[in-house]
Image (tube, grey):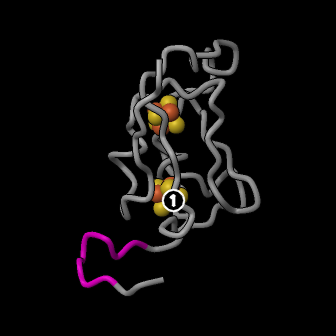
């Protein structure tokens, strides 16, 4: 990974090994597990694996719990992702881009 001088991008890798380690977060797991909101989407978030530092901030902020951690890396479940682009905004290294969907 390239070294960055920008302090804003100086982010620690955070690993959660127990439920008790999870930070307080605005994660909703109620209706999101039942309502497939993927059809609402007009933009699709796409993760650049070369840039991703596996900090899991996108997972923490996704309001639809559409980001799953698989093998230590985030994966977006497009059945549930509604394209709000919060993950795009919150990713500290700009590893997620919002790609416009073709209609
Ligand atoms: S755009 Fe990102 S934050 Fe919004 S629902 Fe999809 S994965 Fe979650
Ligand atoms: S995509 Fe961005 S916010 Fe999500 S784990 Fe990777 S670096 Fe962190």
Q: Residue 62 at x, y = what percent?
A: 49, 37
Give the residues in magenta.
Answer: 4-11
Magenta span dominant secondary structure: loop
Q: Residue 81 at x, y = what percent?
A: 55, 28
Q: Is residue 48 visible?
A: yes
Q: Is residue 94 above or below residue 99?
A: below
Return the residue at label 1: 48
Q: Is residue 93 left or right of residue 37?
A: left
Dot 1: element = loop
Q: Is residue 62 visible?
A: no
The answer to which quarter of the image holds residue 26 is: top left
Q: Is residue 101 left or right of residue 78?
A: left
At 48% from the left edge and 48% from the top edge, which residue is drawn? 58
Q: Could you say which is closer to the camera, residue 85 or residue 13?
A: 85
At 63% from the left edge and 19% from the top edge, which residue is drawn? 30
Q: Is residue 82 above or below residue 21?
A: above
Q: Residue 94 at x, y = what percent?
A: 37, 58
Q: Could you say which is closer to the camera, residue 29 or residue 4?
A: 4
The answer to which quarter of the image holds residue 85 is: top left
Q: Is residue 66 left or right of residue 26?
A: right
At 32% from the left edge and 46% from the top edge, which residue is drawn? 89
Label 1: how many Cα within 10 Å (few below 14, some 14–19, many 20+)? few
Q: Which residue occupies the extreme right position in the image?
A: 71
Q: Is mark 1 within 8 Å of ligand 2?
A: yes
Q: Is residue 58 above or below residue 11?
A: above
Q: Could you say which is closer to the camera, residue 21 or residue 55?
A: 55
At 40% from the left edge and 40% from the top edge, which residue is drawn? 98
Magenta includes 90? no
Q: Residue 10 at x, y = what percent?
A: 34, 76
Q: Is residue 70 above or below residue 3?
A: above
């Amino acid at each position: 990974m390239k070294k960055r001088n920008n302090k804003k991008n100086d982010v620690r890798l955070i690993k959660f090994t127990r439920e008790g380690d999870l930070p307080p977060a605005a994660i909703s797991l109620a209706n999101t597990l039942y309502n497939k909101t993927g059809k609402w989407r007009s933009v699709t978030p796409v993760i650049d694996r070369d840039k991703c530092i596996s900090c899991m901030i996108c997972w923490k902020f996704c309001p639809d719990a559409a980001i799953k951690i698989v093998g230590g890396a985030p994966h977006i479940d497009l059945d549930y992702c509604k394209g709000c682009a919060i993950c795009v905004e919150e990713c500290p290294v700009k590893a997620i881009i919002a790609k416009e969907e073709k209609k």
